[in-house]
């Protein structure tokens, strides 16, 4: 007899749920399935796990951008509207600013705040206010309703609204844990960066004009010292980071390597000439094309004798022609070294606290075009949002800069 007063049939084969011997009103119990029958249905293969990780990575990047935008917009709304409403309405200034049109959503925010208080969800006293519980669309509504108050601080209302429109798609996808395509993620990152710049949070750090600071870089950058990008070869580097973005607008370029093809073959001599004439400085350090080290490198790569030597010599001659057109040749120095080349490095504004470096190690059987590439940002530790006290404050950038200076001091000038 079951707990509900119904008679349960026995579990033997002669008394199945559809048997005519079952008394009227009896309830049939389904037999439990074996573990082996469930396992294959619950298991994920490699492709499924790859898809899940991809979704999580994209959603995580998008969430960081959305979080930064929401916090920045909340700070802007507070800075502009609080002085207007707080003197009259006190702590209820957000409710007053929402007005009759926003009563529904602002009261919902008030209710969520009270529940969070009771359940102990408010971990930071600074978040114990109604403004902290408004969503991105609600913050936007406050800004739009009071646009005359924001107009002196924000140039274009249309830019703000367009960026927020683009972010709304991403916000809905992330909040519901749905699949986020790479195209939508890229659009969200561009819109977020543009909105932060419009709201006065973009900053004017020199290196960000060449290599924009990424939200994820700021938050988890301590895990990777000052490495901000890694590319499997130089082709992929130039696809994401063209030579014009790297060297354009620089005030100083220091380069060390065998033939310096990244600079010589991808950045025009006219641009280098303008860089030097505008007060910049260029120092190029090539491997001596007549040295025994270059012959060893040719053997390592399995190329014809003299092939690499001639290529380096042509690059040096091209740079000499550029230098000859300068009124002050001292701004454009060329030298050669005879040691075994260990790496190639391009230091842009390397003497400052905000330089960029592109570094490649020389591999025995791999041409420079095919070697892995590291992109470094100097002085990044000063601008990190999160900084670990347990990690060394130094990075890789000073190491390569010091190595360049040592090799420059031991090298010989090219007349």
Image: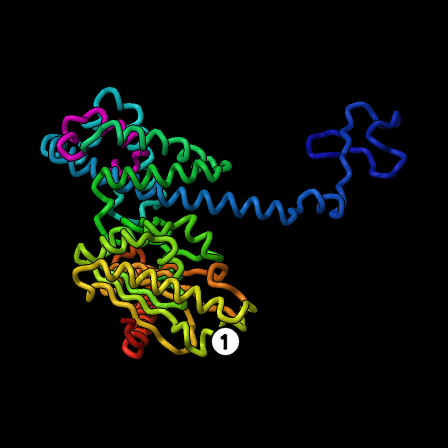
Q: Residues within 10 Å of mark 1 (few under 14, many from 20)?
A: few
Q: Which residues are magenta?
A: 129-154
Q: Whole-percent x and y of residue 18?
A: 84, 27
Location of residue 343 in the rendering, given as x and y in whole percent from the top left corner: 41, 69
**Residue 304 vs residue 22, the one in the foreground:** 304
Residue at the (34%, 40%) spot, across then down: 116
Q: Position of residue 207 (x, y in %)?
A: 27, 54
Residue at position x 76%, y 35% from top? 30
Identify the image quadrant of residue 312: bottom left
Q: Could you tell me what secondary structure mostly forms the magenta stretch? A: helix
In terms of image quadrants, where is residue 159? top left
What residue sits right under mark 1 in the picture?
296
Whether 46 is among the magenta residues is no
156 above or below 182? Answer: above
Res. 138 visible in picture: yes
The quarter of the displayed image where residue 392 is located: bottom left
Q: Is residue 143 magenta?
A: yes
On screen, residue 57 versus residue 165, left or right, reads: right
Q: Secondary structure at mark 1?
A: helix
The answer to whether residue 394 is seen in the rendering is no
Relative vertical location of residue 104 with respect to residue 398 in this rendering, above or below: above
């Amino acid at each position: 007899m079951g707990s509900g007063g119904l008679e349960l049939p026995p579990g033997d084969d002669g008394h199945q749920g559809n048997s005519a011997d079952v008394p009227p009103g009896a309830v049939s119990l389904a037999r439990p399935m074996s573990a082996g029958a469930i396992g294959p249905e619950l298991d994920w293969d490699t492709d499924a796990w790859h898809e899940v990780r991809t979704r999580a990575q994209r959603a995580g990047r998008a969430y960081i951008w959305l979080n930064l935008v929401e916090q920045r917009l909340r700070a802007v709304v507070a800075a502009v509207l609080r002085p207007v409403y707080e003197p009259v309405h006190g702590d209820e200034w957000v409710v007053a600013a929402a007005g009759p049109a926003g009563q529904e959503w602002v009261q919902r925010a008030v209710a969520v705040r009270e529940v969070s208080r009771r359940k102990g969800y408010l971990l930071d006293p600074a978040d114990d206010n109604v403004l902290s519980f408004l969503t991105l669309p609600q913050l936007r509504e406050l800004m739009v309703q009071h646009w005359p108050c924001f107009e002196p601080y924000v140039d274009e209302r249309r830019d703000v609204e367009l960026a927020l429109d683009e972010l709304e798609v991403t916000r809905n996808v992330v909040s519901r844990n749905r699949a986020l395509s790479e195209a939508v993620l890229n659009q969200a990152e561009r819109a977020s960066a543009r909105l932060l710049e419009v709201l006065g949070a973009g900053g004017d750090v020199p290196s960000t004009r060449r290599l924009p600071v990424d939200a994820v870089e700021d938050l988890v950058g301590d895990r990777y010292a000052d490495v901000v990008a890694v590319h499997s070869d130089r082709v992929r580097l130039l696809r994401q980071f063209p030579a014009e973005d790297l060297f354009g607008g620089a005030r100083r370029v220091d380069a060390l390597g065998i033939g310096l093809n990244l600079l010589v073959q991808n950045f025009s001599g006219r641009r280098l000439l303008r860089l030097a004439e505008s007060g910049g400085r260029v120092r190029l350090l090539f491997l001596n094309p007549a040295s025994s080290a270059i012959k060893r490198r040719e053997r390592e790569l399995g190329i014809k004798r003299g092939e690499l030597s001639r290529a380096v010599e042509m690059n040096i001659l091209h740079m000499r022609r550029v230098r000859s057109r300068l009124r002050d040749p001292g701004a454009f120095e060329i030298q050669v070294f005879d040691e075994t080349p260990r790496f190639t490095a391009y230091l842009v504004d390397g003497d400052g606290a905000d330089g960029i470096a592109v570094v490649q190690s020389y591999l025995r059987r791999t041409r420079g075009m095919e070697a892995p590439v590291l992109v470094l940002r100097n002085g990044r530790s000063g601008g990190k949002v999160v900084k670990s006290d347990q990690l060394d404050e130094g990075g890789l950038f000073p190491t390569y800069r010091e190595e360049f200076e040592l090799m420059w001091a031991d090298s010989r000038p090219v007349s």
